[in-house]
Image (spheres, rainbow, N blue to C red):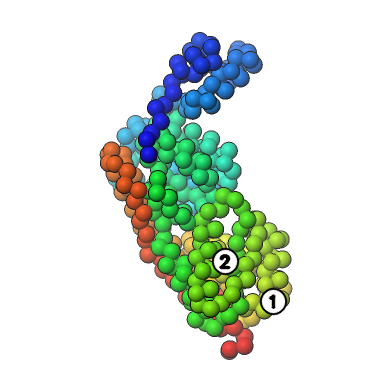
Amino acid sequence: MPRKKRASIIDVAQAAGVSQATASRALSGHPAVSSQARVAVRQAAARLGYVRNLGAAGIASSSTTTVGLLVRNIGHSFYGKVAEELQAHTDELGLELLITAGGDSEEGQMQAINNLVGHGVGVVIVASGRVSNEAMQYAASFVPLITIGCGETRPEFDSVRIDPAYEAMLAQKVVAYGHRKVAVTATSHPLAATLHARTATFITQLVVDGVQPHIVTSHSDYGEDLFDGIDRAIDAGCTAVIAGSDLIAVKILEHLASRGIACPEQVSVTGFDATGPYSSPLLNLTTVAQPVRELARQTVLLAQERLAGSEARNASILVPGEFIEGGTLGSPPEVK
């Protein structure tokens, strides 16, 4: 993908019809700039795709050794672990890692990308299951982009993710236990590409195995609409729930417990990720473990290649996961 030639502050000033000093003050929010000039400068900057070079102020390291990480939420068990492992591997190779959170909104993601590019990063790594295509395209117009742990691959980016065969394997395990009425959680969030792709794999495998899935769609990961959908699925005879993540699985387990429904004696529940507290043997959750350390290692090696100037080869690396037997998957009541 051809990279944009970065617009300069001189280009912005000329387009706005002001001096370079006025343009600089307007973009930094200086109170001495009139509102009319400020609007003109900001509109010109947006039109030209101008990004402030924060690195010029001595804030960032050299672009030849700095990797930017756009993470969805650093407090999330999976993304927090991804950031931790990426930090360890970049440290090992002598690279700098600049981390920023983009959240679940396109506006926040674009702001985070501008922050990274403005600090002169040479590569952007995206660790988010809810990042807009527009935000990724925008980042990739400046520097090479690598996605880690995302549910879909795109030809214009490098990607490193768990092999989707392990998503299919989880659905196969549920069927192998004898479940014939299975609920699958889904999200209506428009940016949740990772969960959309994972849910599609679960559903496809169930259909291949002769099971008609009952899809439970909610907007949030664990809102009342999710619990209402789970209740309807159980009332319809579902004996197992395949959740899109461990967090969702645990929230469902809590809901079942509040209703006095035993797991797995009455209803089985599976998760996905096995990171942080969700990997604890106290939970004993049946899940698939994401190979976070290897995902991070492969991603940093790709980043190192891109920083060295190698031609983008649109790498798509699949890493094996691990099925965790746990204790929340059992046979349905009628076959025990």
Residue 139 placement: quadrant: top left
Q: Is residue 203 left or right of residue 311?
A: right
Residue at the image position 32 percent from the left and 43 percent from the top: 312
The amino acid marked with disc number 1 is Ala
- Whether residue 209 is visible, yes or no, is yes
Residue of label 1: 236
Residue 234, compared with residue 143, is above or below; it is below
Residue 235 on image: x %, y %: 71, 76
Query: Disc 2, disc 1: CB below 8 Å?
Result: no
User: Which is nearer the eye, 260 or 163?
Assistant: 163
For the residue labelled by badge 2, is the local secondary structure a helix, a strand or a loop?
loop
For the residue labelled by badge 1, is the local secondary structure a helix, a strand or a loop?
loop
**Placement of the N terminus among the 4 image quadrants:** top left
Q: Residues within 10 Å of mark 2 (few under 14, many from 20)?
A: many
Residue of label 2: 243
How much space separates mark 2 and mark 1, taking CA atoms? 17 Å
Residue 149 on image: x %, y %: 44, 55
Residue 278, compared with residue 113, is above or below; it is below
Q: Residue furthest top?
A: 19
User: Which is nearer the eye, 5 or 19?
Assistant: 5
Residue 219 placement: quadrant: bottom right
Residue at the image position 54 percent from the left and 15 percent from the top: 16
Residue 42 on image: x %, y %: 56, 22
Which label number is shown at residue 324? none
The amino acid marked with disc number 2 is Ala
Q: Is residue 320 left or right of residue 244?
A: left
Earlier in the chain: of badge 2 and badge 1, it is 1
